[in-house]
Amino acid sequence: MPLKKVAVLVSGGGTNLQSLIDTIHNQYGEIALVISDTPDVYALTRAEKAGIKSMAVDYRSLADKNDFYKILMSALQNFDLIVLAGFLKILPGEFYEKFENRIINIHPALIPSFCGKGFYGLKVHQAAIDYGVKLSGATVHFVDGSADTGPIILQKAVEVSDEDTAETLQQKVLRVEHEILPKAVRLFLEDKLDIIGRRVKISE
Ligand code: GRF
């Protein structure tokens, strides 16, 4: 059987993309396209080094922002799975209709804490520190059209110590992101995820 086609959408350094290149690419699925909403990010270099086709669609330079989503939609037509790996744009509704239960996102906190609009990057970790939580972590979930609300596939916690800053917590959480994102993508590609209401049943 041909490998399923995976597209990865990025906005930055792409360490999560790298974890997928290292463990998923050409084994469980083919990462056939990487799209960035920003040119010159290191994620694009990672794709190039791995011989994966990539495109930068510069959101900021487009006069009509709808063009951005039109370009993405046409590039993604034949994909089985879209992974949002540090992608900062919120995709419009037509994407969830076309790719229902086929878009996966990674969020650097234990949803439903520290998530939703405005919670991205270091802001997430600063909010966790400011609140004084003893545990934070990462969540991989299906995307359902609102920010960070779709059915949860996997979560993993990390301990927050008194010494942690937003930066050190980010590094701790990234380590678990690199475990659970490839795992969730593999489970999807092996057809081992069943969505029942808000629950995702995993058959291993
Ligand atoms: C990660 O923390 C991810 O959870 C969030 O954005 C960050 C991206 O990091 N959505 P990277 O580009 O994969 O290194």
Image: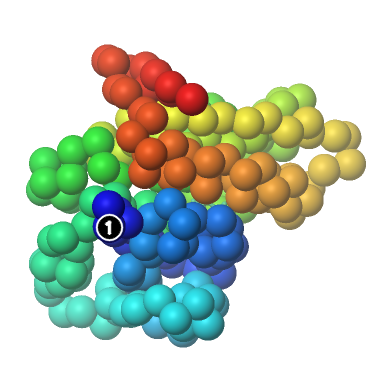
From the viewer's side, name the closer residue of 96 and 81. 81
For image coordinates 37% across by 62% down, the residue present is: 30
Q: Secondary structure at mark 1?
A: loop
Identified at 38% across, 39% down, the residue is 190
Give the quadrant of residue 195: top left
Q: How many numbered circles does the render carry?
A: 1
Q: Under 8 Å from ligand 1: the CB of mark 1?
A: no
Relative to 119, is 1 above or below?
below
| 70 relative position to 157: left or right | left
Instruction: Choose between 160 and 73: the one closer to the eye.
Output: 73
Q: Position of residue 111 (x, y in %)?
A: 50, 28
Left or right of 176? Residue 90 is left
Tell me the quarter of the picture where residue 68 sits: bottom left
Outermost residue, right side = 163
Q: Quadrant of ligand 1?
A: bottom right
Question: Is residue 22 visible in this depiction of the protein?
Answer: yes
Q: Is residue 93 visible?
A: no
Crowd band around label 1 with a 10 angstrom C-alpha radius: few (<14), some (14–19), many (20+):
few
Q: Position of residue 125 (x, y in %)?
A: 64, 43
> What residue appears at the point 63 percent right and 31 percent down from the top-left corner?
156
In the foreground, 23 or 129: 23
Which residue is label 1 attached to? Answer: 2
Residue at the far front in the pictured view: 1
